[in-house]
Image: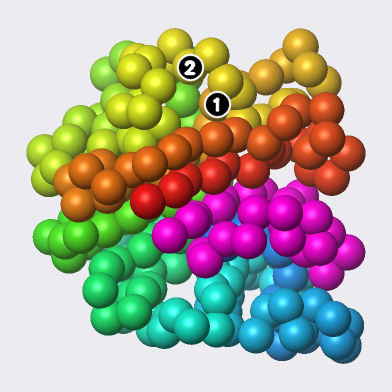
Amino acid sequence: MKVVTWNCNGALRKKFHVLEIFDADIYVIQECEDPSKTNDEKFLEWADRYLWRGDSKNKGIGVFVKKNLSLEKLDWSDLYEGKSVKHFLPCRINSDFNLLAIWTHRNNSPTTGYIGQLWKYLKINQHLFNKSLLVGDFNSNKIWDKRRRVGNHTDVVNELEKIGIRSLYHEYYKEEQGEETRPTFFLHRKKEKSYHIDYIFGSQEFERTLQGFEIGEMDYWLEWSDHLPVICNF
């Protein structure tokens, strides 16, 4: 099984064809439009089996799977102390495992935007994370941790570790959080402003069956987005 996550930087209907080189079973795409709101027939054919959510028809998060896979949306809560956190799209694949698609958002929060949103989501739902993949754009790295703030990147990594879920990049390449040598994001597409902020975390079942982990080639993918695709093989 191959899983790919990519923040496409909008207009997926004009870019989906570049993903065909992966022939992935599952794509988790951030900043993509709602396929149901487009008239592009080729895009609709590609997005034959999908789930999507977002704040507007032009920008959200989508999960796209091959026709031989079943895809079911899960009814997990995104309310933390009465306020929605975003963006999280939980689903069930082949009645076999859970996949949580992630695109963290500032969500008008001065203290718990981005990774803090995931920390809140974990507090609500982590008891449901049995045989699970957490996949997407976390907009976060340990290098941005702030002291005395609960819900930073390290807090999230530690919370997931408690339930046996780890970053598969770090397991595969034997690197530490905050010391990644392979970036996934280039601010304003500038090579000198590179960061690692896209992740695939998995429970022990996925860690045991991990066969390969890749990040897309920089020079090619920066023509399409400020993020590089992250590819995982099981």
Q: Is residue 84 magenta?
A: no
* Residue 115 relative to residue 61: left or right: left
| Quarter occupied by residue 20 | bottom right
Residue 212 rendering spot, x and y as whole percentages = 44, 38
79 over 111 or under it: above or below: below
Give the labeled residue for mark 1.
Answer: 196
63 over 138 or under it: above or below: below
Give the labeled residue for mark 2.
Answer: 180
- At a point 12% along the width and 45% down the height, the residue shown is 163
Q: Look at label 2 and name its amino acid.
A: Glu
Front-most of 189 and 217? 217
Q: Look at label 1 and name its amino acid.
A: His
Rendered-image quadrant of the N terminus: bottom left
Residue span colored magenta:
1-26
Residue 226 seen in the current view: yes
| Quarter occupied by residue 222 | top right
Front-most of 233 and 47? 233
